[in-house]
């Protein structure tokens, strides 16, 4: 009986030890939403990136002590990084987004940008390599459209641009 209790206890502790590291690590995911604003005629993009991960990207870019929350130059540098790693084109021409602003929301940096929209039904090429140079298991989700008509593209390191239709 003692051996059985010891075995069950050991198995339980082993299972707990295996579960703790998995729960202690953040999921490496950035989310971008790309949508046509019918009212303004603009193509809007919203990026949501975990602050911790964004600061690691800045360290990779040579900023020794990035502070996206308290240091505006750090935040601006990350916005430039996003502009390099997230691209959208229409009819072979890149779409140039204008930064509207950014804010801290919980543990995430949220970045807002817009550009003139090619309109609903436009064929787009989208590429999101945000943080794929920092984290090997990074996954970027790009939701295109709004309401119930949303298409989701998933990007990982090295993925090419993907086709989407603007809803």
Image (cartoon, rainbow, N blue to C red):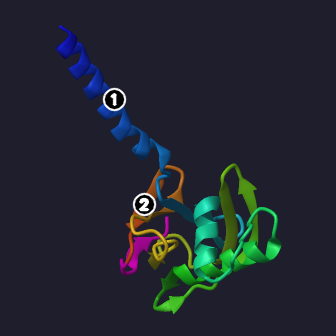
Point out which mark residue 13 bears: 1
SS at mark 2 in the image: strand
Image point (69%, 67%), residue name: 112
Q: Distance between the Cα atoms at labels 1 and 2?
A: 43 Å
SS at mark 1 in the image: helix
Note whether residue 123 is visible: no
52 vs 85: above or below: above
Image point (77%, 62%), residue name: 69
Where does residue 67 sit, x and y in percent of width and height? 74, 67
Q: Is residue 21 left or right of residue 53?
A: left
Where does residue 71 sit, x and y in percent of width and height? 81, 70
| Between marks 1 and 2 in the image, the one whose residue lies nearer the viewer | 1
Crowding at label 2, few (<14), some or many (≥20) Cα neighbours within 10 Å? some
Where does residue 167 sit, x and y in percent of width and height? 49, 64
Q: Check if residue 46 falls in the magenta segment.
A: no
Q: Is residue 45 left or right of residue 130?
A: right
Image point (27%, 26%), residue name: 10
Which segment did they paint magenta?
158-167
Image point (67%, 61%), residue name: 110
Q: Quadrant of residue 137?
A: bottom left
């Amino acid at each position: 009986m003692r051996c059985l209790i010891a075995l069950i206890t050991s198995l339980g502790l082993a299972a707990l030890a295996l579960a703790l590291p998995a729960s202690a690590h953040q999921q490496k995911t950035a989310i971008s939403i790309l949508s046509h604003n019918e009212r303004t005629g603009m193509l809007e993009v919203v990026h949501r990136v975990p602050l911790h991960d964004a600061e690691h990207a800045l360290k990779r870019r040579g900023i020794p002590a990035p502070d996206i929350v308290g240091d505006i130059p750090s935040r601006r540098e990350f916005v430039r990084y996003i502009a390099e790693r997230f691209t959208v084109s229409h009819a072979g021409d890149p779409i140039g987004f204008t930064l509207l602003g950014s804010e801290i929301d919980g543990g995430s940096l949220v970045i807002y940008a817009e550009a003139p929209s090619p309109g609903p039904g436009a064929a787009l090429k989208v590429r999101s390599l945000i943080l794929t140079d920092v984290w090997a298991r990074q996954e970027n989700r790009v939701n295109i459209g709004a309401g119930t008509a949303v298409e989701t593209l998933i990007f990982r390191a090295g993925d090419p641009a993907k086709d989407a239709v603007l809803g």
